[in-house]
Amino acid sequence: MKIQYTENPLNTIIELEDNERKMLYAKLYDEELDRLHYEFEVDAALGENAKRINIFDVAYTVKNLLNECEQALKGSHCGDCICVPCSCNKCLAEQFLGIDTIAGLSEHGARKIAAAFRAKQSIHEAITELETYSQKKFEEWSHPGDEGWRKRSLRWRVEAGWAATWLCAYRDRHFPKELISKQ
């Protein structure tokens, strides 16, 4: 397995060797069979006729899942891991492979990091943006008084501080000191 860390940790690129691809295929196959077995049990419990399983359909489905996972491993995290209401295929594939490229990063921290890199900034600019995070009050804020705003903006600043700390540790772990000193 080749892991290429990028300045934006959400975009880490993972390329699989043949043996890892086969292992991922086997785990996806097993997961698909578990899903089909569950459907079979539910159908039986409801007194419905169980659907026949075509092994070629299972293999086709798993092959498509494998392709989706491989594409996700080369892409960005996008899902629950960054507060987007859907599953993240990259996280799923990483879990099956036994790795976690964003270990220790909360979903709110990941969301802040995603926002800090929105303009394709360097890691140093993203860290600075997170360390100096300040949320402007938007006009649509309709709650009476400012207490609700103060509580939320404090939380957002704390989350940005945690994200900055995590991103600094990530930078120090994955990038040579001479690269850092050039910035």
Image (tube, rainbow, N blue to C red):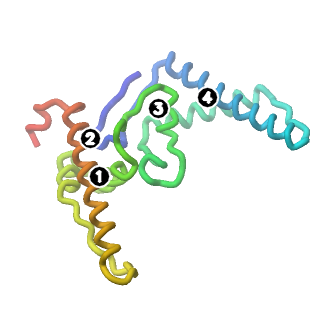
Q: Residue at x 85, y 36 (%)?
A: 51
Inter-mark Cα distance, 4 to 1: 32 Å
- Who comes first in sequence, dot 3 or dot 2? 2
Mark with earlier residue (1, 3): 3
| Residue at the spot 13% in from the left edge and 37% down from the top edge | 180
Q: What element does badge 1 sit on?
A: loop
Considering only order in the chain, which callout, 1 or 2, is on the residue closer to the N terminus?
A: 2
Q: Which residue lies under the disc numbered 1?
A: 117
- The residue at which mark 3 appears reads as 94
Provide residue 55's location: percent of width, then percent of height. 77, 26
Mark 2 in CB contact with mark 1 (< 8 angstroms): yes
| Residue 163 disc label | none
Residue to which mark 2 is pinned = 7
Q: Amino acid at mark 2?
A: Glu
Camera-nearest label, 3 or 2: 3
Quarter of the picture holding the C terminus: top left
The N terminus lies in quadrant: top left
Nearest to N terminus: mark 3 or mark 4: 4
CA distance for labels 2 and 1:
9 Å
Provide the secondary structure element on which disc 4 rests. Answer: helix
Element type at mark 3: helix
Of mark 2 and mark 4, the one earlier in the sequence is 2
Left or right, residue 98 beside residue 129: right
Looking at the image, residue 77 sits to the left or right of residue 172; the answer is: right
